Amino acid sequence: MGQLPERIVCLSAESADWLWRIGAWGNVAGVTRFFRPPANASAKPRVSAFSTAQLDAISALNPDLVIAFSDVQARLAEGLIRRGFPVLATNQRTLAETAATLSLLGRIVGREAEAERQLSVFRERLAPVTNGAVRPRVYFEEWDDPLITGIAWVGELIERAGGTVIVAGQKEQRAASDRVVSSAQICRADPEIILVSWCGKPAQIAAIASRPGWADISAVRARRIYELPGENILQPGFRLIDGFEQIKELVRQAIHSSLQKDAVPPG
């Protein structure tokens, strides 16, 4: 492309959010229905879900760039390429890859300076905390059937927040199919905090707590099962800082409770 794109369709929410933040909302022609624009942002046609899209509606917008995310949208990207549209498909899985992707999008729309300013905030807000030696065991559940644990950036956020990711090595797996875990694994790991964010559907906290064998898990006994909004944790963009703040607070509460319990002299 010899000039900056002026009609961008964002098939995932994090790219739409980022373009709004760096002052390129006027370049956006269409968005996914999973993006909730700020009140002061002009409305854009909603032309996709996550794994599906209205290809004819996208074609009618005559985009000069379509931004897709992840292997889940590979078929959508292929279909749009076959229709002759330029497609940028990103597949960030770590915090570093997320920052690099956001920087790339800033360059594509000619908003490098604002992108770098926002990225400075992003990096600063995601700085690791220091909670001492106490690091609660944390299980993050991305899906319930089968059980799928968190992707790499989620594990990084948990560790930066002062927690310990259970099921060592699982977060390094890039594909969801490689992050499937068993109920027995979770029971053996005995998480002290359970974080849940199921893709596209509300979590059932009571159902999680009542799973066979889970009554003895520390997090279940202490009622530390929490749902995180998908837009704050499952979309690898700027809003991960909101998810990080939530995780930090939940880890802090668990540590405080643990230290208080240890400080109580035996009766």
Image (cartoon, rainbow, N blue to C red):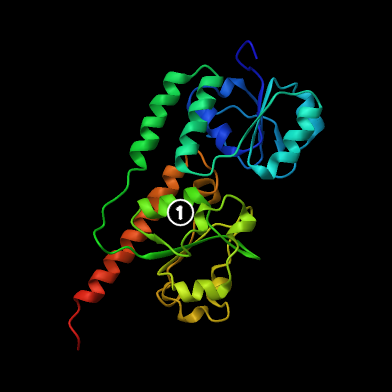
Residue 124 location in percent, x, y? 33, 37
Quarter holding residue 90:
top right
Residue 109 location in percent, x, y? 55, 19
The reply to whether residue 134 is visible in this rendering is yes
- Residue named by callout 1: 155
Q: Residue at x 55, y 28 (%)?
A: 41
Q: Residue at x 49, y 76 (%)?
A: 187
Q: Foreground residue, 228 or 157?
A: 157
> Is residue 19 found left or right of 75 in the rendered image?
left
Q: Foreground residue, 107 or 16?
A: 107
50 w.r.t. 102: above or below? below
14 w.r.t. 136: above or below? above
Q: Foreground residue, 143 or 97?
A: 97
Indicate the amino acid at tag 1: Gly
**Figure quadrant of the C terminus:** bottom left
Residue 102 location in percent, x, y? 50, 31
Q: Specify the farthest residue to the bottom.
A: 267
The reply to whether residue 40 is visible in this rendering is no
Please count the marks in the image.
Answer: 1
Q: Residue at x 58, y 71 (%)?
A: 182
